[in-house]
Image (cartoon, helix red, strand yellow):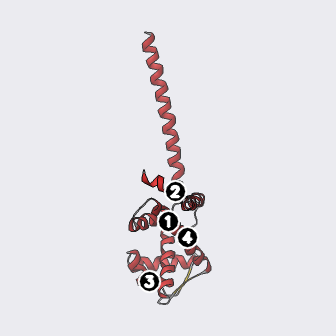
Amino acid sequence: MPTQRFSTRKREASKKHVEESTSSHLAELASAHQPSRREQTPRIEDYVEIIYELIRERGYAKPVDISSHLHVKPPTVTNMLERLDRDQLIVHQKYGGIILTERGREMAETLGQRHALLVQFLRLFDVKELNAQRVTEVLEHYVDSETLEALGRFVKFAGRNMDWWKQFRKQ
């Protein structure tokens, strides 16, 4: 009988541990999925980024070009442009040009820096360029500033300590 009591206690302790670790994991999941405190959605950021790049490369951004690059229908672009205009990220006149406001330009430049850092980080691990770009397009919208700062420090560290980094990459 003493053995049976011990195994019951052991089972209860194990069950409690599983419940605690599950509760902890559930709490982490719930925390990660809380409504974001971020001002902008990933979709808004994609539009601002595309508009910025089109203007930078071509000197202008037209709804048809945005539609083509983001693989969405023109009415979807029109709706988003109205929203971006309301949010004071762009100035858009129907059938006219699209201009980024100062706020929109700053957002686009911040996104560009974030994008470049994430690609640089992935390249350190020999992630192929195309894949690094694709992964970055997803990550750039969800990585917070604290994590970006840490990644930036790591990228700088790896760049200054190539011997250590070469050893790491051989593994």
Depth order, front residue of 117/168: 168
Q: Residue furthest bottom?
A: 96
The answer to the question of whether label 4 and label 3 lie on touching residues, with beta carbons closer than 8 A, is: no
Q: Tell me the residue at 53%/66% (across/down).
A: 117
Q: Tell me the residue at 55%/75% (across/down).
A: 108
Query: Amino acid type of disc 1?
Result: Gln
Sequence-wise first label, 2 or 1: 1
Separation of residues labelled 2 and 4 (CA atoms): 27 Å
Label 1 CA crowd tier, 10 Å (few <14, some 14–19, many 20+) = many
Per the image, the residue denoted by label 4 is 113
Q: Quadrant location of the N terminus?
A: top left
Query: Amino acid type of disc 4?
Result: Gln
Per the image, the residue denoted by label 3 is 63
Sequence-wise first label, 2 or 3: 3
Query: Amino acid type of disc 2?
Result: Asp
Q: Position of residue 59 (x, y in %)?
A: 50, 88
Sequence-wise first label, 2 or 4: 4
Sequence-wise first label, 1 or 3: 3
Mark 2 vs mark 3, foreground winner is: 2
Query: Amino acid type of disc 3?
Result: Pro
Per the image, the residue denoted by label 1 is 120
Separation of residues labelled 2 and 3 (CA atoms): 49 Å
Depth order, front residue of 131/8: 131
Image quadrant of residue 153? bottom right
Is 76 situated left or right of 143 in this image? left
Q: Residue furthest front?
A: 163
Secondary-structure class at tag 2: helix
